[in-house]
Amino acid sequence: MPRSVVIVGGGPRGTGVLERLAASAPEFLPPGEVLDVHLVDPYPQGAGRIWREDQSALLWMNSMAADVTMFTDDSVRCDGPIVPGPSLYEWAVAVRDGELDGETVPDGPVGDELRALGPATFATRRLQSHYLDFVLRRVLATLPPQVRVHRHGTRAVGLRRGTPDTVFLEGGGELPADVLVLASGHLDAAPTEDEAALAAHADAHGLRYFPPEQTTDSDLDRIPAGDTVIARGMGLAFIDLVVLLFEGRGGRFRDRGDGALDYEPSGREPVVHVGSGRGVPYHAKTEYALRGPRPPLPRFLGPDEIAAFVRRGDVDLRRDVWPLMAKEVGWAYYHELFAGHPDRVRGVWDDFALRFAELDWYTPAMWELVAGFVPDPADRLDFERMDRPLADVCESDLARLQERLRSYVLDDLERHVDDRYTAELGAFVGLLSVFAQVAELAGTTALTPRSRAQDLAWWQNFFSSLASGPPGPRLRQLLALSRAGYVVFLGAGLRVEPVDGVFRATSASLDGVAVTAQTFVEARLSSPSVSRSDDPMLAGLHAEGLLDEETLREEHTDDGGQAVHAADAAVAHSGASVTLHNTGLVRVRSSDFRLVDAQGRPDPCRFAIGPHTNVRLPGAFTRPNTNALSFRANDALARAALDVLAAELTSRRSA
């Protein structure tokens, strides 16, 4: 009988794991042996749910075409073979130049977009779906003789344990699974208690409540023209909401000629009042290149520092690691400021760098050093201001808050689209390096449970706000909608309550001002939760104890001192108080992404990878030539799975 792998999730992550399985299979499987790989997804495979072609042509990616690839390159340090391929931009050029056999320019608007695509273009998700389809077809066309792939356009709904396991498909099919890989991406979940209360309030009073979900899957036609809407969240889901509610309803943006836009309404618009915890949109993506050489990284937070934290243990991310993280990003930022903008600094980089390396980030000496070399305070890096830009804002007048927020967004746009500010791109490069190192640390037991549950979530959100924001044109559109009165900013610390037959919103940025509405949109994805997941496969594995929800147990001595940290909630110590931190994430072993069961044991043949796991990875595709963590993770999982299969073959032959 052939050995078999079932990959649940056929989007970019599942495709990436499949590509790595195929790349390494000849090393593990001798000639004549056959591996059947089953790719299971009800959405178009390759693209998956998020990147499927069947969505609005108005929705864009938030990365430039030259910065998106699904293929490994020589920068990727992994054990499997490097199999290069084109980035999104390179693929588009090759297609329109007729350089890829069998690939032709699509008909209609997608084809027009492909012909016009430049390296700095933010492609539509529909065009990205064509690229991802090409990637999957290329993987399938270049499979080694040992690997056969079977595609199933349905859902996996359950598993029966055995040798091999049996995966049940929606509609009645069954698949043998010597190895199971869960690669489903973002998963929906049943509502929390607060969300259920909001939905019940809406039902009782004839209101409209939109729970956290993919914005493209929301029935926004339920929102009538002229309606007052409260939206909570100002990340990418909110940007999608704005696109679909305004331009998606026939509104148009007109260029004034000075870079600003005016909005021309269709008459079908609602008025959206929006706020969030931070109270500002995510930072715009940079639209320029570095002027100087790439910052030399890692410098202050690399493998040696991570290893030292692991040996030490009991690490608090904000207290112990963040100062090094900030210093690393600061190093990259000032490296580009000196190299690319020598007119805005005093002295030379070598002198600054020598003294910078000797100082801790949060010290008066560091502040004095930066102030001495960087005369303009606007050129100095201030993470606290970036994390809480409205901390000192509390207006009693809604109109004045709009002025402040519009000024903030204009400044952000200037910093990310004007190449006078390429130091911001230097910081972005530093953030990517730091993200990779923190991911390595998070895959160990070094962090305290509280820090793992709370500080990692803070860092993920902060990183996303700085590095995963919308293209600049989206913020220009947001400004035009704000000036036209269709988007009203509510600021930071947004609170939404069900009161008196309406939804009522207040914020820390407003003193004595409240907004009421009959429509409330949670402009965000649902929080990860194994216990609330509506995915039948995940729920079934959890019910059987084969998959565990990460619950971090923090124990304290009776005198208040911290006594024990444990990742296993089953550990108990008498005479100590206990704090449980539930992250909602699927527990996997960080080295190879094996599922960890309810007893804390790594599963020999079941794996999970993606945003629903406790190993936080960036997106499934990434920038070329950056030794992408996603590629290394896919490779580690694939080779661990192949090692299981090779061991089974050896055992079978011995028997």
Image (cartoon, grey):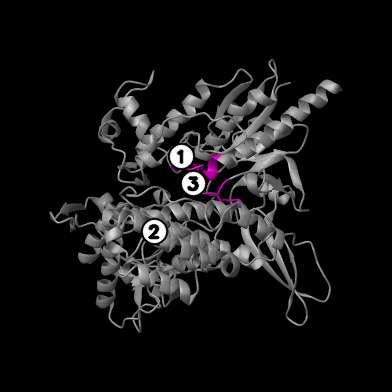
From this viewpoint, which residue is outermost toward the top?
32
Amino acid type for the residue under numbered disc 2: Trp
Residue wearing tag 2 = 349
Q: Secondary structure at mark 1?
A: loop
The residue that appears at 14% across and 56% down in the rendered structure is: 258
Closer to viewer: mark 2 or mark 3: 2
Is residue 612 part of the magenta span, yes or no? yes
Is residue 373 part of the magenta span, yes or no? no
Percent of width and height locating residue 456: 57, 61
Residue wearing tag 1 = 625
Left or right: where 247 falls relative to 614: left
The residue that appears at 66% across and 60% down in the rendered structure is: 309
Instruction: Using a 10 Å C-alpha cutoff, classify the residue at mark 1 as few (fewer than 14 neighbours), some (14 to 19) or many (20 or more).
Output: few
From this viewpoint, which residue is outermost toward the right?
655
Q: Earlier in the sequence, mark 2 or mark 3?
A: 2
Q: Secondary structure at mark 2?
A: helix
Q: Earlier in the sequence, mark 1 or mark 3?
A: 3
As displayed, is residue 478 above or below residue 377?
above
Considering the whole magenta stretch, tell me its main secondary structure.
loop
Return the mark for residue 619: 3
Q: Is residue 523 visible?
A: no
As displayed, is residue 484 above or below residue 111?
below
Is the residue under label 1 in contact with that under label 2 (CB below 8 Å)? no
Return the mark for residue 580: none
The residue that appears at 27% across and 81% down in the rendered structure is: 397
**Quadrant housing the N terminus:** top right
Q: Secondary structure at mark 3?
A: loop
Residue range corresponding to the magenta coloring: 610-631
Distance between mark 1 and mark 3 Cα atoms: 15 Å
Given residues 385 and 599, the one toward you in this image is: 385
As displayed, is residue 111 above or below residue 378?
above
Amino acid type for the residue under numbered disc 1: Asn
